[in-house]
Image (tube, rainbow, N blue to C red):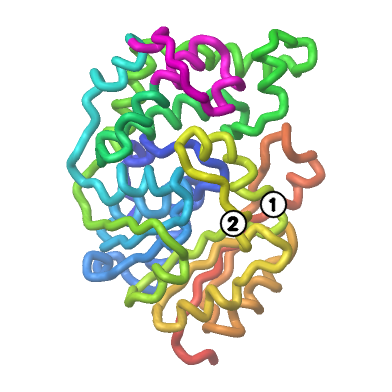
Amino acid sequence: MTGIATSVFDGLPPYPGGKRRLIRLILALINDALPHECWRDATFVDPFFGGGAVSIAAKAAGFQVRAGDIAERSAIVGRGLVANSRHRLDPRHPLRFLESAKTDHLVAEPAILRQLLGPRRAFARAAWLALSDQRDAGLDRDLLAIVAIKLILRSFPLSLPNASDAGHVVAGDYDRLTSARTSHYLRHAPVTAEVIVRTCAAVNASVFAGRATFTKGSALDLLAADADVAVLDPPYPGTQSYERAFRLLDDYLGDPPGETNPYSGSSPPIDELLDACRHIPLVVLCAGNAQMDEEGWAALVGRHRRVLKSIAVPYRHYAAVASERKNATNCEFLILSSNEARR
């Protein structure tokens, strides 16, 4: 359980809200109720795939994994790194992006390119043209897209493409930035052949043998089938929606704008979600404290299932997005529950 190689996470894009930091604790919770030696015979469902850390860890731990998400930015990772167990990327393929970076094309370009400095913008533009020409190329396209996503997101502080100061950087107006933000933009501007090869190696490290599928669709549809374990990690209510945070990246990937996920709102349908899990023996719910404390979340779960254990995990936001006072009280909650009769 704790022997999962950290390299399996290397290929994942740095999407905020991921559970890479908490995944070992999540697996330890599951192990309390379902011993590790039983995992190879168990089905693990991850209906809020996001950046993929939960699914890729479950796959490495031996589960039969069934993952899903509604966003194309997540589906690319799910198909390319979790459902895929053998196909790896030839580093020479994305290197061709550099060769074509100066080619002129009379096409409407995605807005995110205007938020990138010259060297990275040239690469991202050529990558976008290549991906646009390969919409039916299967795993090769997905793996190439992951390389592009990783390199693009690295350009932005906190990996958020909607960073409000990116335009100042492109305009050369560094006086309006803090020194830390200026340093980040300049440090991550170049995209060289070495950077591309290193990124390809990281992506390939996340491709390994295992049993997993990925389905693009709603969480409730994915939960309808039989499973032994489910980890529910919906967007936390009261936080910025992923649709807003990643609008520019979604446009780059050719995914049309979608409605804000209801789980990001002030009244997320958690009761409906838990009711959809009534046939699943073990469920771990991940939640935040923006709107409700640990006791409140445990009581909500307890209306549907027997709560076995609840854990509060302190965490810090980056200083750029949260005050010291808020960081002193930030918590994430992990709530393990069973569908056995409540006692």
Question: Which residue is the site of mark 1?
Answer: 239
Left or right of 301? Residue 98 is left
Q: Is residue 139 visible?
A: no
Position in image of residue 305 (x %, y %): 53, 83
Q: Is residue 242 above or below residue 280?
A: above
Residue lying farthest to the front in this orientation = 106
**Mark 2 closeness class: few <14, some 14–19, many ≥20 residues within 10 Å:** many
**Depth order, front residue of 338/185:** 185
Region in magenta: 100-126
Q: Is residue 274 above or below residue 63?
A: below
Residue 117 on the magenta span: yes
Question: Which residue is the site of mark 2?
Answer: 235
Quadrant hosting residue 195: top left
Q: Which disc is residue 204 wearing?
A: none
Disc 2 versus disc 1: distance between alpha carbons?
A: 8 Å
Secondary structure of the residue carrying tag 2 is loop
**Mark 1 closeness class: few <14, some 14–19, many ≥20 residues within 10 Å:** some
Q: Amino acid at mark 1?
A: Thr
Position in image of residue 291 (x %, y %): 74, 62
What residue appears at the point 42 percent right and 53 percent down from the top-left corner?
A: 54
